[in-house]
């Protein structure tokens, strides 16, 4: 399965409209930029570790999550509003 950045942005937008208890993405947006940035940092470090360890399966698993959280961080920081 593959997604373009535009498709990922649409998925993020849709998940932001879900109930908080059902959407991790929405809970991140509600927590704000500091929480999203922290999560992005965690995912980025795990992605780098997987890449440096030459663990292709871990890299494949971590890369999409890192990308999605990165887009969430960018979107939330850009808007500085709970709704965008």
Image: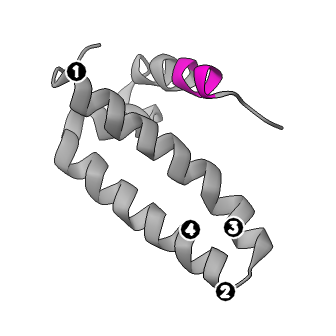
Q: Compute the Cα span from label 2 to label 3.
A: 9 Å
Residue extent of the magenta highlight = 5-10
Q: Going 50% across and 17% down the picture, which residue do you hit?
A: 14
Figure quadrant of the C terminus: top left
- Say the numbered circle drawn on residue 59: 3
Q: How many marks?
A: 4
Q: Position of residue 82 (x, y in %)?
A: 20, 21
Q: Compute the Cα span from label 1 to label 2.
A: 36 Å
Look at mark 2 in the image and give the residue it sits on. 53
Q: Compute the Cα span from label 2 to label 4.
A: 10 Å
Look at mark 1 in the image and give the residue it sits on. 79
Q: Compute the Cα span from label 3 to label 1.
A: 30 Å
Say whether marks 3 and 4 touch (CB < 8 Å).
yes
Q: Position of residue 51 (x, y in %)?
A: 65, 75
The local secondary structure at tag 4 comes to helix
Q: Going 70% across and 71% down the picture, which residue do you hit?
A: 58
Magenta segment includes 82: no
Q: Is residue 23 visible?
A: yes
- Say the numbered circle drawn on residue 47: 4
């Amino acid at each position: 399965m593959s997604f373009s950045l535009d498709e990922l942005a649409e998925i993020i937008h849709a998940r932001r409209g879900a109930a908080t208890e059902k959407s991790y993405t929405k809970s991140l947006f509600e927590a704000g930029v500091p929480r999203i940035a922290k999560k992005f940092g965690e995912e980025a470090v795990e992605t780098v570790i997987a890449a440096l360890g030459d663990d292709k399966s871990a890299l494949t698993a971590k890369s999409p999550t890192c990308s999605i959280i990165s887009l969430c961080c960018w979107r939330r920081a850009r808007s500085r509003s709970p709704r965008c």
